[in-house]
Each structure stands twice: as structure tokens, then as C-alpha cells.
Image (cartoon, rainbow, N blue to C red):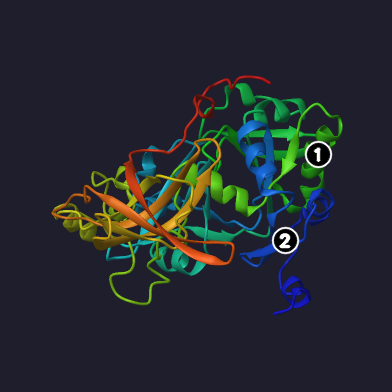
């Protein structure tokens, strides 16, 4: 497909004019039917904006659903593996939901906006599954992807920049909290959430106020007080791997997209045991997950660091150097802040445990000649990278 046809078949974002004014490239990709920049300036400048200053990314293409009604809490608690009866108004929770076989359909975030009023954000289209799952519940489910304009503002100076832009109350907003406010004459919802593993916020407004929201941020940039930089999806990919966050459809096959049997994944196989709550009433997939928990683990999505600086693109993982193939790299990046190659790898277990000697076979090209390199892998528990400012309340001012 030509660039002209590609651009003409994707919807421009409500921030399109602002994005084009800030962008130094024409490097676009499609995201849920919208045009989104992969790289707006340079990958290096965008990465370090997230980790060293303040970055802005368009979140509008994210799938968003408004769920209301007397049974909204009961419906969502039946849908997801986490106990949402404990989610207070004004708070956000990370969730996954499964099919009857206990395999993950998608993950996302649930915003408890008011009593019996929620917003569910997801990576992929979920309206059909939500409507099917809601049979018997007194709920209303409305897709609001195109109605809500959203920006992700992330980085160590994001608190100071947003405060300088006139958003009040951020100093008391805790991680996964929600703030409803009014800025420059329009209503704005701010959540202390993000996909970078750093200090950051997500801003939500009516689509008609997209230009007002954009100008609130980039008028501040024009003063020279803050380095506020537009970023694209490639920089986000780097930092989300550093943070150890997973991406459905990239790091694992979702239950809806899998073609062959046994190629989808459960929350346990993705390392998401901590959001599976068996103490709450029945949820979709509970029986299958209880049975799986009683068996030895057969595979897991592991976080690995690799020796050397050659990225393990499409690499296989072996038990022992040149030994038996035991897995594959699903996502990888070179971390500028850690000076290490990082990978998320789907690895087969032995008697319920990971192999104790993991190696990656890496192919790379240098001066038109292909080379092979073996790199030892180390398993990392938790996040590859984390900074105290992510949770500090109030955040440190800059």
C-alpha cells in the first residue's frame, strides 16, 4: 500500500494539527484505526525526554469503554481476575480478563470514576466480548474511544510542568489516583498512571477540547521553562520493556487471536499471579486457573538481561550454550539507562522451574555480513528499572 493510501485509510487524531506542528518526521503507523507517530523527532531524544524531562504522547487511539448501571461493579468483578469490590471511587486498577479456559483475552486499566461508573481502557477492540459477558447484568456499555481525547505526560519534570500549566492538586495525587479539575475553562480528568514505569500522568478530556488541552501543555513549552517533547510509539516500546510491562498481541498471543491450540497464555504464564484473586466470587476462567495453579509450571514469560550489546531480535533461547531450544524472545531493547540488553522471553520450564543455564542465539549483520553470537542470559525478578520518584507523593519539584 502506498503512503498516500495508508494515510488516507486512517483517522487523524484530535491532536493531529498539534502533532504535525511538533513532529520533525513523517514516520506514522496505525493504531486502532488512528494515525500515530512511531518517531516524532529522534528515538534518542524521545527516550531521554521520558527518563530525564517531560514527554507527551497521544493516547486517544487506546480503546475506551464507559460502563455504568446498578450492576457495573458486579459485572466487572465477574469479568476480570482481580477483586474490584475493593477499588474505591477515584482509583485505578490494572486488570486482565480471560476466557473460560483461563487464557488471557486482554489487559487494561479500570477507572472507578463515580459510584456505578467506570471506564475500562484496553489495547484491543473488546466491545463484542464485553456485551456478551454482560448478559444478565443491568449495565450500559458504551464505546468512547472517539469521544475522549487523551494524552500521556511522563517523566521526572511532569509534575512540575503540569502544575505550572495550572493543574492544581497534583501534589496530593497518589499513584493510581484520579483528579477531576478545571483548567483554562474546560473540565479535565487527570490520573497518575502511565506505561513508562516513571513519574507520570494521563490526561482525559472531551474530544471537542483537544486543542485546548494540547495548547495548555505546549504553550508552556514555548515559554522555555520546561523541555516538553512529543514522543512516538518506538520510545514507549523501550521504556515499557525497562519497566517490565507486557503488551498483548506482541509479547503473547491473546485468546481471541490465537489460531493454534496451546499458543495462548494464562495470567500465571505471564507472571501476573498477583492479580488473580481466588477469594472473590466466580469470575470467567476461575475454574481453569485453579486447576492450573495446582500443577507445576510448564512455561513463563521471563525478564532476561543479556551479556553484550547485540540486541536479541527474534532470537531463540537455549538451555545451555548450543543446547536444547527452550524458548524465544518476544520483546527486546537496548536500555540506555542500564547499559544492558533486556528481553521478555517465553521460556519452557523443567519440573516447574526455569532452566538454570539460559543462552540466546543472536544473529546480526555487520558490513553486509551476517554473524552469530551466543549471549548468556540472567533472569530478573520484578522490574528491570524503577525509580523512587514514580511513587513519591508529593513528587520532587523541578
Tell me: 239 left or right of 61.
Answer: left
On the image, the x and y values in percent for residue 351 come to 13, 54
Residue at 48%, 53% in the rendered image: 311
Of helix, strand and loop, which one carries label 2? strand
**Residue position marked by numbered label 2 in the rendering:** 27
Is residue 116 in sight in this rendering?
A: no
On the image, the x and y values in percent for residue 27 come to 72, 61
Of helix, strand and loop, which one carries label 1? helix
In this rendering, the answer to whether 225 lies above or below 107 is above
> Which numbered disc flags the more N-terminal residue, 2 or 1?
2
Tell me: 253 left or right of 142.
Answer: left
**Residue position marked by numbered label 1 in the rendering:** 218
In this rendering, the answer to whether 51 lies above or below 285 is above
Of residue 173 and residue 367, the one placed in the foreground of this image is: 367
Residue at 74%, 53% in the rendered image: 207
Q: Residues within 10 Å of mark 1 (few under 14, many from 20)?
A: some
Q: Residue furthest bottom?
A: 1
On the image, the x and y values in percent for residue 60 come to 66, 54
Q: Residues within 10 Å of mark 2 (few under 14, many from 20)?
A: some
Residue at 73%, 67% in the rendered image: 11
Residue at 48%, 70% in the rendered image: 128
Of residue 82 and residue 40, the one placed in the foreground of this image is: 40
**For residue 386, which numbered disc appears in the image?**
none
3D distance between C-alphas at marks 2 and 1: 21 Å
Amino acid at each position: 500500500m502506498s503512503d498516500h493510501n495508508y494515510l488516507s485509510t486512517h483517522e487523524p487524531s484530535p491532536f493531529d494539527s498539534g502533532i504535525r506542528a511538533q513532529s520533525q518526521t513523517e514516520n506514522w503507523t496505525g493504531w486502532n484505526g488512528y494515525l500515530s507517530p512511531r518517531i516524532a523527532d529522534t528515538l534518542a531524544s524521545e527516550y531521554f525526554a521520558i527518563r530525564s524531562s517531560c514527554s507527551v504522547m497521544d493516547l486517544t487511539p487506546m480503546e475506551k469503554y464507559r460502563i455504568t448501571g446498578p450492576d457495573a461493579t458486579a459485572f466487572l468483578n465477574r469479568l476480570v481476575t482481580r477483586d474490584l469490590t475493593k477499588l474505591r471511587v477515584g482509583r485505578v486498577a490494572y486488570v486482565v480478563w480471560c476466557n473460560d479456559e483461563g487464557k488471557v483475552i486482554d489487559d487494561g486499566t479500570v477507572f472507578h470514576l463515580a459510584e456505578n461508573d467506570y471506564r475500562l481502557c484496553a489495547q484491543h477492540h473488546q466491545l463484542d466480548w464485553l456485551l456478551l459477558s454482560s448478559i444478565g447484568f443491568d449495565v450500559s456499555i458504551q464505546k468512547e474511544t472517539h469521544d475522549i481525547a487523551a494524552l500521556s505526560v511522563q517523566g521526572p519534570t511532569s509534575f512540575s510542568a503540569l502544575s505550572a500549566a495550572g493543574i492544581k492538586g497534583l501534589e496530593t495525587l497518589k499513584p493510581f489516583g484520579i483528579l477531576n479539575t478545571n483548567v483554562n475553562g474546560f473540565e479535565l480528568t487527570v490520573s497518575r498512571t502511565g506505561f513508562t514505569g516513571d513519574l507520570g500522568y494521563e490526561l482525559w478530556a472531551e474530544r471537542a477540547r483537544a486543542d485546548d488541552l494540547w495548547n495548555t501543555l505546549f504553550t508552556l513549552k514555548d515559554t522555555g521553562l520546561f523541555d516538553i517533547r512529543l514522543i512516538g510509539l518506538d520510545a514507549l516500546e523501550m521504556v515499557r520493556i525497562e519497566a517490565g510491562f507486557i503488551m498483548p498481541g506482541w509479547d503473547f498471543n491473546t485468546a481471541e487471536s490465537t489460531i493454534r491450540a496451546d499458543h495462548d497464555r494464562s495470567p500465571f504464564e505471564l507472571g501476573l499471579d498477583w492479580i488473580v484473586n481466588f477469594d472473590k466470587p466466580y469470575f470467567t476462567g476461575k475454574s481453569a486457573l485453579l486447576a492450573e495453579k495446582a500443577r507445576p509450571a510448564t512455561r513463563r514469560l521471563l525478564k532476561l538481561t543479556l551479556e553484550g550489546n547485540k540486541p536479541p531480535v527474534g532470537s531463540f533461547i537455549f538451555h545451555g550454550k548450543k543446547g536444547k531450544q527452550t524458548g524465544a524472545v518476544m520483546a527486546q531493547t537496548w536500555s540506555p539507562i542500564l547499559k544492558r540488553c533486556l528481553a521478555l522471553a517465553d521460556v519452557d520450564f523443567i519440573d516447574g522451574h526455569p532452566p538454570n543455564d539460559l543462552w540466546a542465539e543472536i544473529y546480526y549483520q555487520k558490513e553486509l555480513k551476517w554473524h552469530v553470537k551466543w549471549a548468556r542470559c540472567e533472569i530478573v525478578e520484578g522490574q528491570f528499572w524503577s525509580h523512587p520518584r514514580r511513587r513519591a507523593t508529593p513528587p520532587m519539584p523541578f
